[in-house]
Image (cartoon, coloured by chain):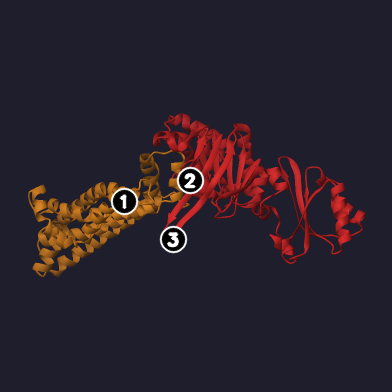
Chain colours: A orange, B red
């Protein structure tokens, strides 16, 4: 085991959190509007548009079907152009966002589909504009489900970030691969695995609690 | 005033076109409580959605105070919708907002200042009798309470017209009664025109002054509730009005007499007198009396004796008492 194991792991945790949280945030900044557009342009939506819906749908599906580890390598030129380097945690954020955004988009779309269609009809009958329906009805009504989705997204992105360890992505993934895989230091590997499990648990638990607390459909 | 002129709505399905509404012509005057009744699948909900253009009619027009709604720009249409409110069978409240905030929603989107909206919402809560539920979420309310909140929300923009799409169909009879009372009260005190979509005759009887009977997308009969109730012309109206008890099912083919009471005769012991004067026994198959427009109305379904002479006497007696009746055999319907 390395002498400064705790310093090493501490740094790994911080880098992992930085990558995961920033990527999730960026993925949602892209995913919410695209998810909303997919939802409203559907043929039963409030603003049906077959072309926009089909084209966006195809792009999202294409990106979703590329395995993360392949995407990570495939977009290296893009990452270098954007960040200037391809190693380290900041550089890893790029492929994480590219990979997570389509996934988040579908999560957002599915949360929106859970909103009672009658409520949207009621809002339409009251003379709401489309923007008012999105901001005041659709997103607030879907909020609890969106939060649950975010908890799932965050843990998936955490998994991706560990994979990025193979290309020097930084964070706990890199620590596990460098010590556990290349140096056969099983102890470090096990500790990083345990830490990843704990982090996933924390995100999942916190996410579910926030979702439950915000959901007014549940009687407390 | 709302006029529906040659209104048609056809849905194109993979299995072919479905004509949900066919050539409907109706005039709904200001202050009316207008019932549109029909069995499920008759096109009632589509028809009511055409009135505020939630469904675009395939042809024909909807005139609201003389203005053809289809000719309006989207912005103008949204404005018109502020004066045509709607309530639903499923209430459709925003589940993540309190009762008060739900009522504030239509005022929010029309730019009413927050404080003013709040005050008005409180006033509306008082009208619907739920002042103590301002901070409750819909999940904490009963069905009847939810519909009251929905009514308050619908009234927030001072609408001229209130569309009720099966608004009481999900409620029990007692709650239905109280919601209908509330609607009638709103019609009387605020002058809101109400259009009631329902499959239940008792809803029409309790609050409507006019009614249109819808069958397979077409209006088969229209008139005042009194006219239609006392002398239904269409088979569909008869079906909706006639009480269907189990006893009736068993007398297929027998001659039946449907006696209709108006406000006066229901206070007279008609059947007793009939029996005494005609020296014959009649079998009461079903009876129903109710309050329409403040007067007692009712009907009774009698099975006639087998001999012609008795039948003749009974009819003569009814004629002499000026009691309206209709003959029929049950399997004719």
Is the residue under label 1 in contact with that under label 3 (CB below 8 Å)? no
Residue ID for mark 2: B93
Residue ID for mark 1: A50
Neighbourhood count class around disc 1 (C-alpha, 10 Å): few under 14, some 14–19, many 20 upward = few
Is the residue under label 2 in contact with that under label 1 (CB below 8 Å)? no
Neighbourhood count class around disc 3 (C-alpha, 10 Å): few under 14, some 14–19, many 20 upward = few
Q: Is residue B279 above or below residue A37?
A: below
Q: Is any part of residue B215 visible from this angle?
A: yes
Q: Nearer the viewer, residue A203 or A99?
A: A99
Q: Quadrant of residue B236?
A: bottom right
Residue B261 image point, x, y percent: 78, 47
Q: Chain of mark 1?
A: A
Q: Are marks 3 and 1 on the same chain?
A: no
What whole-number distance in Å separates the C-alpha atoms at marks 3 and 1? 21 Å
Of label 3 and label 2, which has the lower sequence position?
Answer: 3
Q: Quadrant of the N terminus of chain B?
A: top right
Q: Nearer the viewer, mark 1 or mark 2?
A: 1
Q: Residue at x 12, y 59 (%)?
A: A74
Q: Secondary structure at mark 2?
A: loop
Residue B175 image point, x, y percent: 62, 48
What whole-number distance in Å separates the C-alpha atoms at marks 1 and 2? 30 Å
Q: Nearer the viewer, residue B44 or B22?
A: B22
Q: Nearer the viewer, mark 3 or mark 2?
A: 3
Q: Nearer the viewer, residue B175 or B233?
A: B233
Q: Chain of mark 3?
A: B
Q: Is residue B211 left or right of residue B75?
A: right
Q: Chain of mark 2?
A: B
Q: Quadrant of residue B245?
A: bottom right
Q: Nearer the viewer, mark 3 or mark 1?
A: 3
In the image, which disc is placed on residue B15?
A: 3
Is the residue under label 2 in contact with that under label 3 (CB below 8 Å)? no
């Amino acid at each position: 085991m390395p002498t400064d194991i705790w310093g090493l792991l501490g740094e790994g945790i911080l880098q992992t959190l930085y990558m995961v949280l920033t990527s999730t945030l960026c993925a949602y900044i892209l995913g919410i509007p695209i998810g909303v557009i997919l939802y409203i342009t559907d043929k039963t939506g409030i603003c049906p548009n077959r072309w926009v819906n089909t084209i966006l749908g195809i792009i999202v599906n294409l990106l979703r079907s590329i395995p993360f580890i392949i995407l990570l390598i495939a977009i290296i030129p893009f990452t270098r152009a954007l960040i200037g380097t391809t190693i380290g945690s900041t550089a890893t954020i790029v492929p994480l966002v590219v990979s997570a955004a389509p996934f988040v988009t579908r999560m957002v779309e599915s949360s929106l589909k859970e909103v009672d269609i009658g409520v949207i009809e009621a809002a339409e009958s009251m003379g709401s504009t489309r923007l008012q329906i999105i901001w005041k009805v659709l997103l607030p009504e879907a909020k609890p489900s969106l939060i649950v989705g975010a908890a799932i997204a965050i843990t998936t992105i955490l998994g991706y970030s560990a994979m990025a360890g193979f290309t020097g992505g930084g964070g706990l993934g890199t620590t596990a691969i460098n010590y556990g895989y290349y140096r056969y230091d099983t102890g470090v590997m096990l500790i990083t695995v345990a830490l990843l499990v704990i982090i996933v648990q924390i995100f999942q638990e916190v996410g579910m609690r926030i979702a439950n607390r915000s959901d007014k459909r549940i009687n407390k | 005033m709302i006029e529906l002129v040659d209104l048609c709505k056809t849905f194109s399905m993979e299995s072919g076109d479905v004509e949900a509404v066919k050539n409907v012509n109706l005039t709904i005057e200001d202050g009316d409580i207008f019932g549109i009744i029909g069995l499920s699948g008759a096109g009632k909900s589509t028809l009511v959605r055409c009135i505020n253009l939630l469904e675009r009619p395939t042809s024909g027009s909807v005139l609201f105070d003389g203005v053809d709604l289809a000719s309006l720009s989207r912005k103008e249409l949204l404005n018109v919708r502020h004066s045509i409110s709607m309530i639903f069978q499923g209430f459709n409240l925003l589940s993540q907002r309190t009762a008060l905030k739900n009522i504030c929603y239509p005022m929010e989107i029309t730019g009413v200042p927050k404080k003013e909206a709040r005050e008005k919402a409180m006033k509306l809560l008082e009208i619907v009798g739920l002042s103590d539920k301002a901070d409750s979420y819909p999940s904490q309310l009963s069905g009847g309470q939810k519909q009251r909140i929905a009514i308050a929300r619908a009234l927030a923009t001072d609408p001229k017209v209130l569309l009720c799409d099966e608004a009481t169909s999900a409620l029990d009879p007692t709650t239905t009664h109280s919601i209908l009372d509330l609607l009638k009260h709103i019609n009387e005190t605020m002058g809101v025109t109400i259009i009631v979509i329902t499959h239940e005759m008792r809803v029409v009887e309790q609050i409507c002054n006019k009614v249109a009977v819808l069958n397979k997308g077409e209006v088969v009969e229209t008139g005042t509730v009194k006219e239609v109730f006392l002398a239904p012309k269409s088979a569909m109206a008869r079906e909706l009005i006639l009480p269907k008890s189990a006893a009736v099912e068993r007398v297929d083919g027998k001659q039946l007499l449907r006696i209709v009471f108006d406000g006066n005769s229901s206070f007279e012991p008609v059947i007793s007198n009939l029996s005494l004067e005609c020296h014959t026994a009649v079998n009461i198959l079903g009876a129903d009396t109710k309050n329409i427009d403040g007067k007692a109305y009712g009907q009774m379904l009698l099975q006639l004796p087998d001999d012609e002479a008795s039948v003749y006497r009974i009819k003569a007696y009814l004629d002499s008492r000026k009691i309206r009746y209709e003959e029929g055999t049950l399997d004719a319907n």
